[in-house]
Image (cartoon, rainbow, N blue to C red):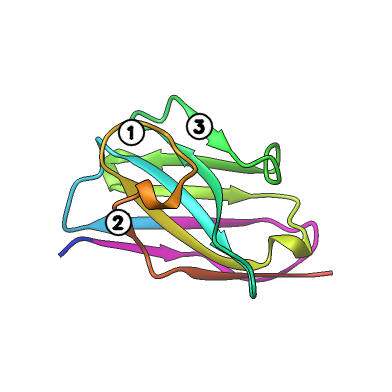
Amino acid sequence: QVQLVESGGGLVQAGDSLRLSCGASGRTFSRDAMGWFRQAPGKEREFVAAITWGGFTTYYADSVKGRFTISRDNAKNTNYLQMNSLKPEDTAVYYCAARRGQGLTRNDYEYDYWGQGTQVTVSP
């Protein structure tokens, strides 16, 4: 069974940092693009960041560019989202996703596997 499991969420204050992790099992994702999405209460799920299988190319939403960094460790079948200078508007459930193949995309319907999400809450 293919599983993506996010961890590292929590409650922090504005300006703090968090690092989310996404561990994969049931399949090797070393040849897949990986992405992060988030969904705030009452809002649609939105793209946050994505990374190619080799880790050489990344793609960010404008709202997080310069504050968030996506990375991956294929040996551990894990990818990460380092979030710095967090703002209250970053509050959301964060989801990890995997897309078969190498292409980067911000479209959630193009991702094949999803985690259950981890809550990130940023207080003012």
Residue ID at (55%, 60%):
38
User: The magenta stretch spans which residues?
Assistant: 3-21
Q: Nearer the viewer, residue 91 or 46?
A: 46
Q: Residue 87 lies in what quarter of the image?
A: bottom right
User: Identity of the amino acid at label 2?
Assistant: Tyr
In this rendering, the label closer to the viewer, 1 or 2: 2
What amino acid type should be assigned to the residue bearing mark 1?
Trp
Q: Earlier in the sequence, mark 3 or mark 1?
A: 1
Closer-to-camera residue (4/10): 4
Q: Is residue 71 above or below residue 98?
A: above
Q: Is residue 4 magenta?
A: yes
Q: Residue at x 69, y 40 (%)?
A: 62
Q: CA distance from mark 1 to mark 2?
A: 15 Å
Q: Which residue is mark 1?
A: 53
- Residue 113, which numbered label? 2
**Residue indicated by mark 3:** 58
Decide: few, some or many residues near mark 3? Use Cα within 10 Å; few <14, some 14-19, many ≥20.
some
Q: Quadrant of residue 56?
A: top left
Q: Secondary structure at mark 3?
A: strand
